[in-house]
Every structure is written in structure tokens, then in C-alpha cells.
Amino acid sequence: MKEHPIQGMMGTAMEKIKEMVDVNTIIGDPIISPDGTTIIPISKVGFGFGSGGSDIPAKTPVELFGGGCGAGVSIQPIAFLVVSNGDVKLLQLNTNDTTADKAVEMVPKVMDKLYEIFSKSREDKNKIKSEKEKKTEDDIDE
């Protein structure tokens, strides 16, 4: 059975995508700095593929076909894995933060601020209480 022309187009496009996207595209090759720090880039890869075609009826014995296909690849760096002196850190790039992402990221900062406010308030209350107790003791001594 003869291969349909659309199969050839799709096969070629898929082979080209395989050539462009592999595991080394997502987890990049390590970069070693002079001080021994290893940096490994991490990327987000997305791709799309589409094809279509139609056999065109003809009055001649020649089979007519019209079609096309296309593919696209998007590679976006999202983080770097840094290995230095036995410590491993993930440094994220914040390129497309949504409002929800920003709100979640702010939670630790807000909690720290609240802790500072309540700690200061507690210290102030203890200081006032201590001053009142001291004043009461001074009044009793007189």
C-alpha cells in the first residue's frame, strides 16, 4: 500500500522536533566556573504541531493532494541549579509571575512583619507593665 503524502510531511516534522527537543534541552549541560561552582540551567520546553490536507478529486488518473504541516518549539529558562562547596541551591527566574504567584511569594514576608509587630507590641506591654510595677513599688516604699 502506498504511503499517503500527509504521512511523509508529518514524519519529517516529527523527526525535526525530536532533533530540537531532548533531555539536554530541559536540563542543560553543566557550566563549571573557575572556583569550582557548577551551574546547571533548567528550562521549560513547550511545542505544538499541526497538519492538514485534502485529496482533491480530479478527472485525470493523477492523484492530487494539497496539504501542509508546521511545528513550533518554545524554550524558556526557568531556573539554575547551583552546586557550590557541597551546597545545592535552586535559583528560580521569575519571568511570568501571576498575581497568585506574587501573593504566595509575599506570605513569608508578611508573616515576618506580623511577627515583628506583635513582638514589639509584646515588648512594649511588658515594658509598660514593668514601669507600672516599679512605680507601685516606689509608691509603697514612700
Image (cartoon, rainbow, N blue to C red):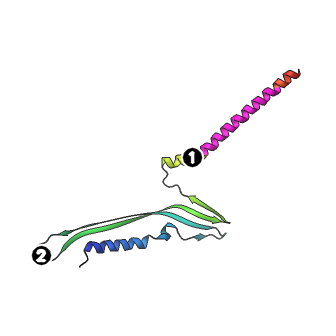
State which region is magenta: 109-134
Residue bearing mark 2: 60
Q: Is residue 75 magenta?
A: no
Task: Find out whether the residues at labels 2 and 1 contact each other: C-beta distance under 8 Å.
Answer: no
**Residue 37 spot, x, y in % from top left:** 64, 67
Q: Nearer the viewer, residue 100 or 68?
A: 100
Q: Is residue 53 above or below residue 136?
A: below
**Residue 10 spot, x, y in % from top left:** 32, 71
Q: Residue at x 80, y 27 (%)?
A: 133
Q: From the viewer's perspective, tell me whether residue 35 is left or right of residue 20.
A: right
User: In the figure, residue 11 lies in which quadrant?
Assistant: bottom left
Q: Is residue 116 magenta?
A: yes
Q: From the viewer's perspective, tell me whether residue 97 is left or right of residue 39.
A: left
**Residue 46 spot, x, y in % from top left:** 42, 63
What's the CA distance linking mark 2 and mark 1? 70 Å
Residue type pointed to by label 1: Met
**Residue 40 spot, x, y in % from top left:** 57, 67
Circle number at residue 11: none
In the picture as drawn, the residue positioned furthest to the bottom comes out as 1
Q: Residue at x 41, y 72 (%)?
A: 18
Q: Residue at x 79, y 30 (%)?
A: 130
Q: Main secondary structure of the magenta part?
A: helix
In the picture as drawn, the residue positioned furthest to the right comes out as 142
Sooner in the amino-acid sequence: mark 2 or mark 1: 2
Q: Residue at x 63, y 41 (%)?
A: 113
User: In the figure, residue 16 lies in which quadrant?
Assistant: bottom left
Q: Nearer the viewer, residue 140 or 45?
A: 140
How crowded pointer 1 is (Cα within 10 Å; few <14, some 14-19, many 20+) is rated as: few
**Quarter holding the C terminus?**
top right
| Kind of element beneath mark 1 | helix
Circle number at residue 106: 1
